[in-house]
Amino acid sequence: MTNENKVFEWRVRYPAPAKLNLMLRIIGRREDGYHLLQTVFQFVELCDWLTFLPNDSDDIVLEDAISGVENDNNLIVKAAELLKIETGYSGGVRIRLEKNLPMGGGLGGGSSDAATTLIALNSLWDLRLSQQKLMELGMLLGADVPVFVFGYAAWAEGIGEELSRISVKEQWVLILRPNCHVNTKEIFSANDLTRNSKSITIDEFNAGQAVNDCLDVVCKHYEAIEKALCDLSVFSEARLTGTGACVFALFDSKNLAIEAELKLKDKWQTYLTKSSNKSPLFA
């Protein structure tokens, strides 16, 4: 976030990109119930967009409410309020949200919105918190928030907060969104979830070890996701991101991705995008 004060300005639209989990291994469980993971995060160019406007009062106002989500429970509002509590900042802000990422899809939309809020308001309010501090605050909001603050494709361990930069091939991506909402807590509580996978190295991931330990349990509980994976696998290796519901496939060319989308878009909600090792927010 070098020279961020020269970059972040009021009334500018800032991206909150989606992420993919290119691999997800569950290698243990802590005494407090949190699962120990190995995963690889990569961003895609599909984004929500946030605009921050000065507010004459000290209120945090989200102008575009999300259906079914009370503003007080929205991670955007929680992120802004957390910054105020942490720093003692007394001002307010009005926030406009253009929501493009599907909720509950495993693409990290809410976490990304929160991260963009932390980063943008840290600059706009001149709070001068370090990136590490913002990542720590992000962890209080959700396990996926830190990687969006981190801003680069990452090898993640621990409960997802131990991040190291990784370079992954950037490709065209076709994402399918089945018409269901996965209960992440339900998946991680399942008795038949694999929790003792062997740890692997980055080299082993690069050599092709890219399983998602949640896949079998998710498919068992959500038939639509299993069908989406089957349909997409005709065109390229189909994978689950996080616990879903979204599934995705990577393509070496835009034309191949478009060809697959044309054959699937009448049956599934589709998103054609491109992966990126650098968050669009920082790019």
Image (cartoon, rainbow, N blue to C red):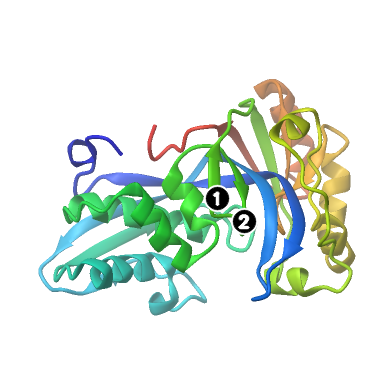
Q: Where, by quadrant of the figure, is residue 250 drawn?
A: top right
Horizontal and vertical percent position of residue 45:
51, 37
Which of the pair 283/47 is nearer the observer? 283
Q: Is mark 1 on a helix, strand or loop?
A: strand
Q: What element carries label 2?
A: loop
Q: Where, by quadrant of the figure, is residue 161 drawn?
A: bottom right
- Residue at 75% in and 35% down: 205
Q: Is residue 263 above or below residue 27?
A: above
Horizontal and vertical percent position of residue 66:
46, 69
- Residue at 12% in and 73% down: 57
Horizontal and vertical percent position of residue 90:
14, 71
Amino acid at pointer 1 = Glu
Circles 1 and 2 in contact, beta carbons < 8 Å: yes
- Residue at 49% in and 72% down: 67
> In which quadrant will I find the N terminus?
top left
In the figure, is residue 23 to the left or right of 149? right
- Residue at 67% in and 47% down: 39
Q: Residue furthest front?
A: 31
Spatial separation of the CA atoms under disc 1 and disc 2:
6 Å
Circle 1: is it few (<14), some (14-19), or many (20+) Cα within 10 Å?
some
> In the image, which disc is placed on residue 162?
1
Kindly tell me whether residue 209 is visible in this rendering.
yes
> In which quadrant will I find the C terminus?
top left
Question: Circle 2 sits on which residue?
Answer: 158
Horizontal and vertical percent position of residue 237:
82, 36
In the figure, is residue 178 to the left or right of 13? right
Q: Which residue lies furthest to the left in this view?
A: 56
Q: Is residue 57 above or below residue 157?
A: below
Amino acid at pointer 2 = Gly
Q: Is residue 140 above or below residue 148?
A: below
